[in-house]
Image (spheres, grey):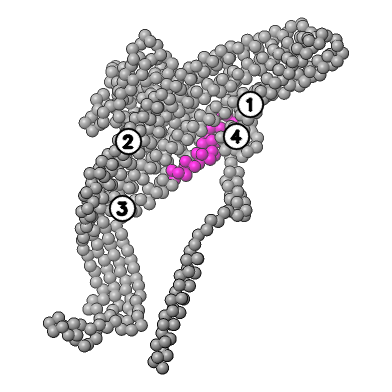
Amino acid sequence: MTRFASSLRPRGHKARASFALAAAALLASGCSVSPKPLTDDENVSRLREDMSVIMAPQEPIAGPVSMHEAMARAIKYNLDERVKLMEMAVANQQLDLSRFDMLPRLVAGAGYTGRNNESGSESLNLATGRRTGESTTATDRHRRTADLGFTWNILDFGVSYLRARQNSNLVLIADERRRRVVQGILQDVRTSYWRAVAAERLLKRIEPLEKRIEAARKNANALEAQRVQAPLQTLSYQRALVDTLRQLQTLRRELVAAKSQLGALMGLPPGENFSIQMPPDVTGKDVPAITASVESLETYALLNRPELLEESYNARITADETHRALLKLLPGIDLNAGLHFDSNSFLLNQRWADYGARVSWNILSLASAPDTHAFSKAQEELVAFRRQALSVAVLSQVRVAMVQFRELSQEFSLNADQASIDRRIRQQYVNSSTVGQQGDMSVIQAEVSELVSDLRRDLVYADLQNAYARVMVSAGVDPMPEAVPSQDLTTLRQAVSDGLGAWQQKAGGTARLQDLLVPATTSEKTPAEKAPAEKAPVEKAPVEKAAEPKVASVAARGEEPAERKAAVPERVTVAELPLQPAASMTVPMTVSYSPSSRTEPAKVYSVPLSALAPMGRASAR
């Protein structure tokens, strides 16, 4: 019997091993992952969900859409703007979560432990080397436990604090990215609006003219068949008609999509019809006025461009990352305390409290300290160089924007004059007593020339408005205040109108940097308060020593929230910018440029890098 049992024992081991292998294979097959493409039902569900958001109901369009209303609708309903708002919301939530990482750990636990036999043990007499022969136990077979432990690592607290500070800068970065998107959207809306205005004006005139040309072509074909005139004269007439018709079709192609582009920027569903509020016909006198100094514009751009502020916040994040890397090299201090319960009947005290402290230090981490510090400093220098390179690009963008605005202003004046001349020529043909085929053709050609001139004038005016908006964007101007009481269209439309009005009022005058940095609705000062400001020498700020050209621009912010003014007092006036960098500042960045006129010497001015330091902005949480 014993032999039989011993023969069965290996088979039992083999059976258990086989069962274990089969269970492991089954578990592995269940955990395997294979590519699973989307099904048709999932695609249809995604499409319905996306279209429900895209086609979500909006505030109805009550009447013709003005430019300010188009901008307000773009801010509220444009999907790109909504994406940036969601990114800001996510960054704020991440900041809220990171604050909890600074709290100590308070862990509560409870459990039950049981076993099928006693946990007895014997003892060994060390003096005699013999076992005592008696089995003893100090633990119940079934027991319950509960714990409430408090743990705080001071080093982890410091690291979590720096991480939370980095997340707070990420919130500000998200705000600057939203500003940049809003500025770009409003620039596109301005351009599309004026192109749509040109389309509304001219498309109504193209269709009747096309009908007249088609009728003239039929008459020309009839004359050719009847051989009333010389064939060469008739064919030349037909060719002139075809060329004219081709010009009209080219004009139609230029204008037909303008209104749809404006609707897409406003976030309207595709195909939704709306009308545009038609402003008066533009003339050569309708050129936007920008007479602020180029130096003021450049300095304003260096202080307010979202990209530069984003890089400044990145510099903060990089500096905190350096502090985190160095902080991890320090020893960690753990403070702990706890309350405990154990139902073991052998314990003298089933409830007790304990506390303690522990210091731990990875000594080998000191070997990497020099490399860690060098790497962190290299990252900080990289961020600084990247910001300085971006500053040079910003200065170039400002100059290019101003040159384009000046050239388009001259081009628009010429096109406006040509449109006026073609209008008078057409009127002369209409009033003329010339009749017959050649007279009709002359009138048609005069009308087409007038139409083409009007189109060129209106399209160049749209480009001029785009260049005007590009000047604002290159200077980092917000077309509306950052803090808006509500997001309804009426409030947004008024905010956009006020912001653009403040910019036009300041940029249209002989504004200098002080005028452009002060909010538009500052309180009026008494004559006694105005006198010191008027007597203040221009030499207070290095950027104002240079001569001010006549064609230049800079942007006005409009009124800023009170909390933002309180947080950033240095942005109120350029007089507060130091002439010499303080001991804590880096070396000033020197920017030089050569004016277009060779009679003027090259101008050099210095902008302290501290002027590009991060500035507090009220985050729209």
Mark positioned earlier in the residue sequence (1 or 4): 1
Tell me the CA gap for discs 4 and 3. Answer: 48 Å
The residue under the point 28% across, 18% down is: 539
Question: Which segment did they paint magenta?
Answer: 63-89
- Left or right, 620 with reference to 566: right
Mark positioned earlier in the residue sequence (2 or 4): 4
The residue under the point 61% across, 36% down is: 61
Residue 16 location (% of width, % of height): 44, 78
Residue 147 location (% of width, % of height): 30, 69
Residue 532, quarter of picture = top left
Mark positioned earlier in the residue sequence (3 or 1): 3
- Left or right, 16 with reference to 256: left
Task: Name the residue carrying label 3.
Answer: 102
User: What amino acid does circle 4 point to?
Assistant: Gly
Q: As displayed, is residue 61 above or below residue 462? A: below
Task: Name the residue carrying label 4.
Answer: 263
Q: Nearer the viewer, mark 1 or mark 4?
A: 1
67 magenta-colored: yes
- Left or right, 415 with reference to 212: left
The residue under the point 28% across, 52% down is: 157
Mark positioned earlier in the residue sequence (3 or 2): 3
The C terminus lies in quadrant: top left
Task: Name the residue carrying label 2.
Answer: 382
Tell me the CA gap for discs 3 and 1. Answer: 59 Å
User: What amino acid does circle 3 point to?
Assistant: Met
Tell me the CA gap for discs 1 and 4. Answer: 14 Å
Task: Check the image and name the residue furthest to the left.
Answer: 127
